[in-house]
Amino acid sequence: MTDIHKFGGASVRDAQAIRRVAEILQQHSDQKAARLLVVSAMAKTTNALEEIAQAGFAGKTEESFGMLNRLRSWHEAVVEELFAERPKEKQSLLAELNDLFVEAEWLLEEEPPQNYDFFYDQLIPLGELLSTRILAAWLKTEGLPVVWLDARDFIRTDDSFREAHILWEETISRCRQQLTPLLKENKIPLTQGFIGSTSDNYNSTLGREGSDYTAAVLAYALDARCVHIWKDVPGVLTADPRIFENPPRLDRLSYREAIEMTYYGAQVLHPKTIKPLQNKNIPLEVRSFLQPERAGSLIQNEAEETYPPIISIKRQQALLQISTRDFSFVAEQHISLLFQHIARLHLRVNLMQNSAISFSLCLSDQDGKIERLVEEIQELFKVQVQRHLELINLRHARPETREEVLKNRLVLLEQRLGNTVQLVVKKLEKVKYKN
């Protein structure tokens, strides 16, 4: 039996957090189950690397190198703090990190390719490679039998860069060949979330916050007993605590409810995480690394329950209102053409609605893709764009919940499906959660 433990970016954000990971592993060992660790990049690292990627792709080499050096200094400072009394281990680890940064420098020095998503995926995995090298070195000094592994050796994907799809058959085969022997020897494999590789050995990524999904993929491949995801929140909450005050925690919820929550924007888990676990009935526990002694939220196959109002927010949204130039009906061939462009640009559609002569789309606004879409379709369609919007998703909402959430907000588009209401709105303030 194997338990998968996934540690997010906040749980490895600095030296103190990394020490806490070691304490959690020492305190939560189960002699009946082997353990495998999946680790994200240190908090804010991926954001920093995205800025570096944007500068590098734009040919701003000096600017990208400056940001990369700041990232290097930050990681080296964490190493200095952790290994201040272990100079031999410190020098060895710093040499490993230097090799990773040199590879990133080579990438930034080259002429950038035309495909930004490809360029992005070749650079962004640096974050996970750095954090796992540091954590593995520390856990070894703490006496844990950790073996660092490169996820790109066994997580195989297609070449849909930035949103790569798992090649399941090859991934399962490689996982069992490379991971199972270590687990049988009571070793603790430690690997990266979020990243994989294509059949041509190019880096690929599974989508933002994809480390949760990596943990689920490995659990499926290895028939794991349970997945434990360690977060900086006490479990699955009914709303984002960065926006709403004191949202309650859900102690238990079904796979179905978890899938619906993540699909509609709850950020506690990657949207693809649940399905592989549901397929093999593997429970998922979301726990707080700040309070590891407390129980978290358990997601498993169980009967549907009555849930309190659940609120999620998707920010950085754009609302496109598209109409034909000759005022003809928006027919199936028009919609088909629009979605060909949307699919090619890897845009994320979060809501859509059509009338006789117009078609409205709420899309995630990122990487200049909205501009490219408008440019490609404007010869055939009139396009009005509203940006800097939020998409509010209410599940199991009561009238008072909806009223409270919409205070001081302008609703631009509203849609209801079953017990879920979606609202595209302007302006978002911190409000009190009403249970």
Image (cartoon, rainbow, N blue to C red):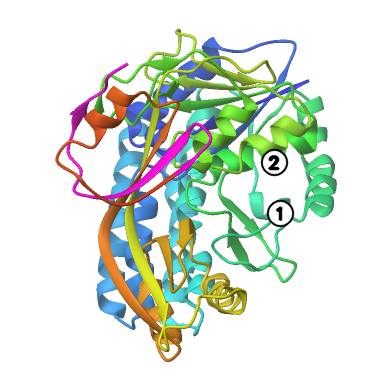
**Is 247 rendered above or below residue 135?**
above
In terms of depth relative to the viewer, which is nearer, 130 or 326?
A: 326
Residue 418 painted magenta: yes
Q: Secondary structure at mark 2?
A: helix
Looking at numbered disc 2 in the image, what kind of residue is underneath it? Val
Residue 294 painted magenta: no
Asked whether residue 243 appears in the rendered view, the answer is: no
Most distant residue in the left direction: 408
Residue 406 appears at what percent x and percent y?
23, 37
Residue 407 appears at what percent x and percent y?
17, 36
Residue topped by disc 2: 217
Q: Is residue 370 left or right of residue 226?
A: left
Quadrant where the image shows the C terminus: top left
In terms of depth relative to the viewer, which is nearer, 195 or 75?
A: 195
Residue 182 appears at what percent x and percent y?
77, 33
Asked whether residue 156 appears in the rendered view, the answer is: yes
The earlier-in-sequence mark between 1 and 2 is: 1
Residue 399 appears at what percent x and percent y?
32, 25
**Tag 1 near tag 2, CB within 8 Å:** yes
- Residue at coordinates 57% horizontally, 44% vertically from top-left? 193
User: Disc 1 to disc 2, how far (Cα)?
Assistant: 8 Å
Dot label at residue 110: none
Magenta stretch? 416-435
Circle 1 Cα neighbour tier, 10 Å, few/some/many (<14 / 14–19 / ≥20): many
Looking at numbered disc 1 in the image, what kind of residue is underneath it? Ile
Q: Is residue 429 left or right of residue 231?
A: left
Most distant residue in the bottom direction: 379
Instruction: Give the mark count.
Output: 2
In terms of depth relative to the viewer, which is nearer, 381 or 249?
A: 381
Q: Secondary structure at mark 1?
A: loop
Residue topped by disc 1: 166
- Residue at coordinates 50% horizontally, 53% vertically from top-left? 96
